[in-house]
Image: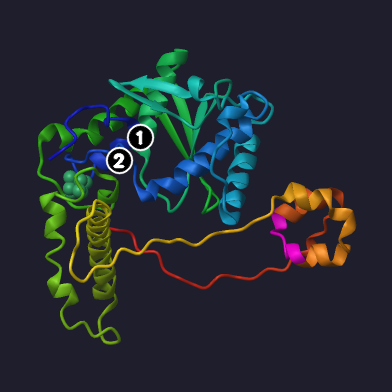
Amino acid sequence: MSGTKREWLRPSALPKLARCGQFRGDPVGSVYAERGTRMDAWFRYAFTVGVVADAETPKYPLKEDEHESVNWAVDTARALAGSAFIEARESELRIEAEGMTGTADLLCEKLGWSADLKSGMKGDYRSQQAAYALGFMERYFVDEWTVYLLYCDEREVETLRFTRESATEAIHDALALYHGGVPPVANEFCGYCVNRFDCPARRESLGIIPEFQAIMFEQADSTRLVNFVRAAKVVEEYSEKARREVLARMLKGEKIPGVTLAKNGKTTRTVANEHIARLADKIPIADLVAAIGSLSANKAQELLREHFDESMVTESHGSAYVTIRKK
Ligand code: SF4
């Protein structure tokens, strides 16, 4: 298996190592992590505007629901700090603990806490946060530390309190499987692991044929349906990987029977908003507004400021769906 260097051994790997001692973080990241990374960047930026250079402005915009989740977390962190200063500069948030380095999301030295933004569902982050807590305790020569986990999609705060002993113990517990050389065990973090496409435990979960055989959806019990979805997800990931490999070969010129290389040659024509703004007084306002269409409630609030009124907002609700944790 790949991933023998220890750069991957960071606090964020600890909860994953506690599930599988063979886990190795994927240096190129994972599709699952992309949303969280984008939200983290904007979360920190909200506290450092005016302190950091413009070059550090997060590159990728947030979607409407992400924007609301990050705003909740910003307000919550500010409420937790009261009048105390919140540190969000990356250089000040780096810690070292038990031979690992990592970066927390926020720090309030005066009140003895750090905080991490968590998107998605609640999880077990105690070992990861123990490393940050131990790092800060060592830096500030204190014996207790508090961590707030800000679950921004669920609008929930989880509070973890550590002493030096409890933090060290949590880290060592998480590393027990890793040090024990235990065989890999497929789990919900496989999608973040560099070994995910050639790991024997994962391949075993492709022995899913029984799950797919003659499933009668309406008659199947719920556990079987959930197992079916999980198994299908693994096949989807493998299929995507195979599709990318096929594409790479065809782009190099290989002809593969039955496969056509389609290129998206669509041309997009746009007019930059500065041209519209320059000519705005020549356009009837009703036509201009109709062309722009409805704005998100957040955008409208920013634009209308004190003229904004909650009664202007129309809410439409998305369709219901289920989220199934990968095992
Ligand atoms: S793919 Fe999953 S089971 Fe395999 S080593 Fe990685 S985390 Fe462990």
Residue 89: x %, y % from top left: 54, 24
Q: State which quarter of the image contains the C terminus.
A: bottom left
Which residue is painted at 19% across and 61% down in the image? 255
Q: Nearer the viewer, residue 254 or 171?
A: 254
Report the side of 220 relative to 33 (left or right). left
Gap in angstroms between the C-alphas marked 2 and 1? 6 Å
Question: Is 19 displayed left or right of 119 in the figure?
Answer: left
> Mark 1 highlights which residue?
128
Q: Magenta segment range? A: 291-298
Q: Nearer the viewer, residue 97 or 94?
A: 94
Badge 2: how crowded within 10 Å, few (<14), some, or many (20+)? many
Asked if disc 2 and disc 1 are in contact, CB closer than 8 Å, the reply is: yes
**Up-down relation of residue 145 to residue 316 (above or below):** above
Residue 140 shows in the view? yes
Mark seen at residue 15? 2
Return the mark for residue 151.
none
Colouring style: rainbow
What element does badge 2 sit on?
helix
